[in-house]
Image (tube, grey):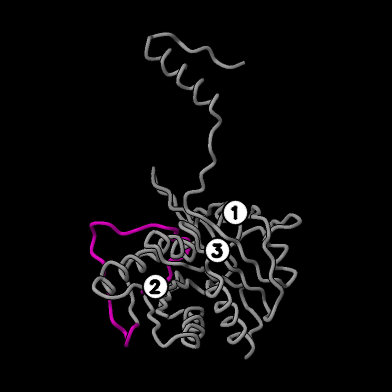
């Protein structure tokens, strides 16, 4: 099994070193492509029509000057262009949980999403900050990945990927929570202001808002959380809404002002 490991915290981050070690306990064909620096909240952003610098650091290990998702693109479009693509993409382990609105912002999950565009099953791993790591962590996580791989027909359908959050201690029970609301980037701090120019910083951190049954509650209670996500996220509109919209558009095109709703 060929495994590609990427992250958004950078090629030298402890999380990717550990995840690579886990991957190598499962396969002798493990490749690593990660950003040359921290790219937190990189989401699914790509670098198009601008140079990317790929640096070979050691056998099957590369740094990339671009975004987390660029690491997948560079691997698929360049590194494996004339070779077998990975069977599985692992992202992380992110330094901090990825919950709620992070599902859209996260570079870790941006990696997993990008992998699905190439038809490759993918899992994004995140863990609470300052975990209480022990020598049980590696074999337990390897067992989890092995189980997910063996049962990939259940979750790795087209356009879908997994988000896994790890609590402070492993082993742990596993839950599928509902997705809550705990937005990062809620405030801005003024660094300097001169004339018409103001420099601001959006600080790190979150409020840790939680409601019963969401990811934060599950993680805080010591559980691993697993959520299956998809990139298309379609919610069909009602047919009568579209019919009414067509009528409104036709009236506007005919020069008739559409009455405002009361």
Whole-number angstrom distance, CA of label 3 to CA of label 2:
31 Å
Cβ atoms at labels 1 and 2 below 8 Å apart: no
Give the structural element (helix, strand or loop) at label 3. Answer: helix
Q: Earlier in the sequence, mark 1 or mark 2?
A: 2
| Residue of label 3 | 155
Q: Between 191 and 45, which is closer to the camera in this rendering?
A: 45
Q: Earlier in the sequence, mark 3 or mark 1?
A: 3
- Looking at the image, is 214 positioned above or below residue 8? above
Where residue 14 appears, as percent x and y from the top left, is 50, 81
Is 41 included in the stretch rendered in magenta?
A: yes
Where residue 44 appears, as percent x and y from the top left, is 42, 58
Whole-number angstrom distance, CA of label 3 to CA of label 1:
27 Å
Q: Nearer the viewer, mark 3 or mark 2?
A: 3
Q: Which residues are magenta?
A: 35-60
Q: Residues within 10 Å of mark 2 (few under 14, many from 20)?
A: some
Q: Nearer the viewer, mark 3 or mark 1?
A: 3
Q: Between 56 and 202, which is closer to the camera in this rendering?
A: 56
User: Which residue is located at x 62 percent, y 78 percent?
Assistant: 130
State the predominant SS element of the stretch in magenta. loop
| Residue of label 2 | 37
Where residue 105 appears, as percent x and y from the top left, is 50, 57
State the quadrant of the C terminus: top right
Where residue 117 appears, as percent x and y from the top left, is 39, 59
Left or right of 199: which side holds 226? right
Q: Between 12 and 194, which is closer to the camera in this rendering?
A: 12
- Looking at the image, is 249 positioned above or below residue 149? above
| Residue of label 1 | 183
Residue 179, quarter of the rendered image:
bottom right
Is 224 included in the stretch rendered in magenta?
A: no
- Looking at the image, is 98 positioned above or below residue 34? above
């Amino acid at each position: 099994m060929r495994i590609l490991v990427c992250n958004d915290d950078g090629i030298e981050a402890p999380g990717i070193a550990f995840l690579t070690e886990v991957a190598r306990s499962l396969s002798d064909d493990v490749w690593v492509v990660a950003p040359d620096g921290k790219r937190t909240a990189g989401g699914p952003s790509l670098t198009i029509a601008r140079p990317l610098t790929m640096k070979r650091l050691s056998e099957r290990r590369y740094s990339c000057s671009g975004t987390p998702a660029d690491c997948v693109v560079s691997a698929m479009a360049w590194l494996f262009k004339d070779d077998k693509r990975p069977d599985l993409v692992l992202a992380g382990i992110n330094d901090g949980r990825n919950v709620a609105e992070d599902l859209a912002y996260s570079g870790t999950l941006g990696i997993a999403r990008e992998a699905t565009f190439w038809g490759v099953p993918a899992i994004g791993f995140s863990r609470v900050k300052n975990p209480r790591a022990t020598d049980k962590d590696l074999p337990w996580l390897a067992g989890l990945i092995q189980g997910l791989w063996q049962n990939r027909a259940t979750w790795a359908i087209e356009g879908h990927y997994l988000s896994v959050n790890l609590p402070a201690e492993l082993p742990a029970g596993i839950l599928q929570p509902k997705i809550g609301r705990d937005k990062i980037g809620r405030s801005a701090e003024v660094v300097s202001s001169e004339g018409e120019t103001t420099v601001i910083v959006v600080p790190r951190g979150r409020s840790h808002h939680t409601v019963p049954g969401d990811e934060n509650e599950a993680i805080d209670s010591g559980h691993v959380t697993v959520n299956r996500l998809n990139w298309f996220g379609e919610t069909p509109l009602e047919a009568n809404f579209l019919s009414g919209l067509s009528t409104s558009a036709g009236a506007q095109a005919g020069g008739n002002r559409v009455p405002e709703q009361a």
